[in-house]
Amino acid sequence: MVGDAASAVPARPTAGSAPAAQACATSTTAPKGSALKPIDQAAFQAAVAAAAEQMMIPGAVVLLCTPQGRFEALTGTTQLGTQAPPAGDTHFRIASNTKTMTAALITLLAQDGKLKFSDPVSAYVPGVPNGDNITVEQLLKMRSGLYNYTSDPQFSATLDADPQKAWTPQEVLAIAFGHPPNFAPGTSYEYSNTNYALLGLIAEKVGGSGLAQQLQDRLFGPLGLTQTSLPATTDTELPQPFSHGYMYGGSIYALRDDPYPADLQAAARAGTLQPTDYTNQNSSYATAAGGAVSTADDLAAWIRALASGKVLDADHQRQWLRSLQVEDPANPDGQQYGYGITYQRFGPEAAMHYHGGELPGFNSFIGYDTDNDVTLVVWANLTLTPEGMTTANALLPTVLNQIYAGMALPTAPAPAPAPTPTR
């Protein structure tokens, strides 16, 4: 029931546990002159729980690390009909946050001298439309112009008809290549999972082993991310402990941004329509673009390590930072997208390198504020609110208002100037 799902458990400030402790400092107050508020544990928990309940999210986790330490706001349940609170070590599907990992691996391979960002995709994968003119860098920055395979309506219909189907990168690329490119390479920005399906194949070709093994050897293992993995193509299970993942309606609403019809919204809000359990939908269709599984603890350590320069050497970290390019030239102060990372300023004193993740069942956000040493992970086990808002992004204004002094972002149900979801 919704009432049970929205029940809250207390916030838990802790000294931190590995690997999440790597993302948390130990001072007890916000630095003098800081843009940060002193975190009030009770207010933090209450604000997140109230927002999650209003959005009818079954369960959510917000993991925050600031110079004051580690804070968790945990609310609801990992499975409808039970009292099973989520926690920092609860596994969930991280969707497009996987792109931060795929992009980092590609950058490491460039660091090794095994590829160049200026290489054409045709040097690694045959049969790509405009493949001689699309560079590795354009794939990383979403500037290839290639059609996004997850936008194909028949693709969503196939997912719902056969949720256990195992997909190969070649199968999803065939869907993409069945549509004409949307623009000439390098002339515009458009978020497309096709780019990262190709990057996964490139990594396997030049890295000499499977994508999952390279991610383990180059990223997860060295950083101590013991709860993070890219599942095998046929693996539809999640490691214990895990959260179920829910969504109203079919896969198309998550994959194409199609708005919920009014009758679906009304039925969901009234409780006469229950969300579908998408926990074990086979995520092999996402793989390099969004197939990984992790926990809030691991993701906190990951995004801080990546954004603070612990993954790449100094030269390639500078290239990673310089890769950012404004998505919409008409809005030069808006979001920028680079090598698998977004950057946005939320106010005079707050900016983050971040990414988002969305697929049927889950929605999430990972971010790191370099200036103020803030690490933030938000995940929810409902993809979209009954009104069609992406849940983690809809929670962000509430969370940011708790973190930053002078921040007063409008919160749901009012439209909120939160980051655009990246899938």
Image: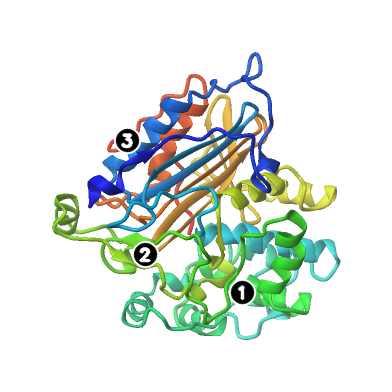
**Sequence-first disc among 1 and 3:** 3
How far is mark 1 from mark 3, CA to CA? 41 Å
Residue 49 pos. (x, y %): 36, 37
Q: Above or below — where is 227 with respect to 47? A: below
Q: Secondary structure at mark 2?
A: loop
Tell me the tag on residue 50: 3
- Name the residue furthest front: 83
Identify the amino acid type marked 1.
Leu
Near-viewer residue (217 or 145) = 217
Residue drawn at x 73%, y 42% as measured from the top left:
308
From the image, state whether disc 1 or disc 3 is nearer to you. 3
- Residue 69's place in the image compared with 280, above or below, is above
Q: Is residue 187 left or right of residue 301?
A: left
The x, y position of residue 177, in whole percent, is 50, 81
Q: How is the image coloured?
A: rainbow
Locate residue 295 relative to residue 419 in the image: left or right.
right
Q: Is residue 271 left or right of residue 187?
A: left
Give the structural element (helix, strand or loop) at label 3. Answer: helix
Q: Which residue is mark 1?
A: 198
Q: Amino acid at mark 2?
A: Arg
Q: Relative to the observer, which residue lies in front, 60 or 187? A: 60
Report the disc number at residue 256.
2
Going from N to C along the chain, the mark reached first, 2 or 3, is 3
